[in-house]
Amino acid sequence: MRSLFTFLRREGVVEINYAKLLRTPKAPQKLARVMSEEQTNHLVDGVAAAKLERPFPERDAAIFELLYGCGIRVSELAGLNLDDLDFSERWMRVRGKGRKERQVPFGKKCASALARYLEVRQAKPGERALLINHKGTRLTDRGARGIVKFYARLVAGDDSVHPHSLRHAYATHLLSAGADLRSIQELLGHARLSTTQKYTQVSLTDLMKVYDKAHPKA
């Protein structure tokens, strides 16, 4: 309507563009579906089991441990370099949006997966990238997405799972376990707390399901 009235005003058909008074309707916001802890661990452990015929099973297991264990974006995953990892303190340097850097901890399972991968990592001389493709060069974020899709379909039987699904699960499971919202904001690298607060809506939705199912007065 706005475009139509702008055209009519330009052509002299109407004198006043009344369409400027129209408000844009807001589409209802849908909460992202988040995998449960059982579903996520089933997927991550299924990748680590290496039962599928894959050329680089250790790398694939490390990818899932990093995505779920650290909650990083797929672009941040692809951008990791070898010197970004501190195994002694179990911290990694992550370069996020706007070239902002942050420190993210990784757990024992992630450290073990990374150690197994580094033992078999075959890269071209001088390649600094942590994750390597079949050419021995840096794995792209598109390549990482394809790997996640492959395992999501064959291990979890769910084509809708993508790298950001693991980031959603990371934040939601931390919140459900009692983690502070500000701390989750720092871990995720969100510039605004309002971006992190969407996970409280998901958590409250799950809480209401438990309430409706369990409380006698529900």
Image (cartoon, grey):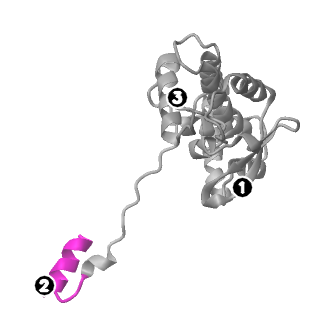
Three-letter code, disc 3: His
Residue at x 64%, y 40% (from the top left corner): 127
- In the rendered structure, find residue 101 and report the number of the disc placed on it: 1
Q: Which of 48 and 87 is in front in this view?
A: 87
Residue identifier under label 3: 134
Residue at x 87%, y 38% (from the top left corner): 89
Q: In which quarter of the image is residue 72?
A: top right
Q: Farthest front residue?
A: 125
| Residue 85 position (above or below residue 215) | below
Residue identifier under label 2: 11
Q: Nearer the viewer, residue 118 or 114?
A: 118
Three-letter code, disc 1: Glu
Three-letter code, disc 2: Glu
Q: In which quarter of the image is residue 218?
A: top right
- Inspect this view and state whether residue 216 appears: no
Q: In this view, does 79 lie to the left or right of 148?
A: right
User: Label 1's element?
Assistant: strand
Number of residue marks:
3
* Residue 3 x, y percent position in the rendering: 23, 72
